[in-house]
Image: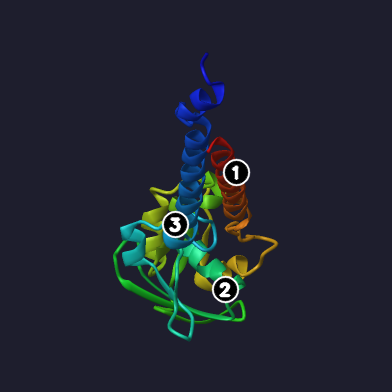
Amino acid sequence: MVNMTSASKGKFPVMPVLLGVVVVLVFAAAGYLYYDTYVTPRCEACGMVITPMMSERIDVRTPDGVRHWACCPMCALMLSQKYAEIEYKTFCDSTNAPIDVKVKDGKLVSASPETVFVIVGKKISGKCMDNKIAADSAAADALLTKAPAGSPKMMIGMAVTMAADPATMPLKWAPSPWLMMGLVVVGLVVLVGTAIAWRKLK
């Protein structure tokens, strides 16, 4: 007569192994979410992943020297909603001339050159990539020929006022840790369940 207890003990522990695989996958997913949210540079205004070109052309810093990420001119100016004082350094999207803009308490402090214009193409297309910055009116007009039809052309002071107003241009990137925390909790629960199942099979 076959000893059923011995036979069951000799079986491959399928369920604990499967649960172990689930635990690994859950923690791997939580790790990926953490990396994608907090390690990968993202625009602090809209959440877009920062490309090497964006990193080279857009430099936004607070007085303490900390760099903050932005994907386009308007998103850079929108960071004035988060920080009391910012300095935004970039290049004209038409002539590549250097541009330096300083904002404090949501108001323009200085712009170099003083003739800076912003093309707010996102108002028409909904895409940040259509927002452009120009060193002067002529450069802005050149950019308008390639911008979505009807894109607003505004002087830097007006652009700063618009970008600093959350009612007009609200910040959209607000990463939440809750999904990652939920995955970690699920992983821990499954891990405990796996340990209990393994002990019962011994």
- Image quadrant assignment for residue 171: bottom right
Q: Nearer the viewer, mark 1 or mark 3?
A: 1
Check disc 2 and give the amino acid type.
Ser
- Residue furthest to the left: 96
Check disc 1 and give the amino acid type.
Ile
Q: Residues within 10 Å of mark 2 (few under 14, many from 20)?
A: many
Q: Nearer the viewer, residue 44 or 189?
A: 189
| Mark 2 to mark 3 CA distance (whole Å) | 26 Å
Residue 125: numbered disc: none
Across and down, in percent, residue 48 comes to 47, 54
Q: Secondary structure at mark 1?
A: helix
Q: Nearer the viewer, residue 95 or 47?
A: 47
Tag 1–tag 2 contact (CB < 8 Å)? no
Across and down, in percent, residue 63 comes to 48, 86
Q: Which residue is mark 2?
A: 80
Tell me, yes or no, if residue 14 can be seen here: yes
Check disc 3 and give the amino acid type.
Tyr
Q: Secondary structure at mark 2?
A: helix
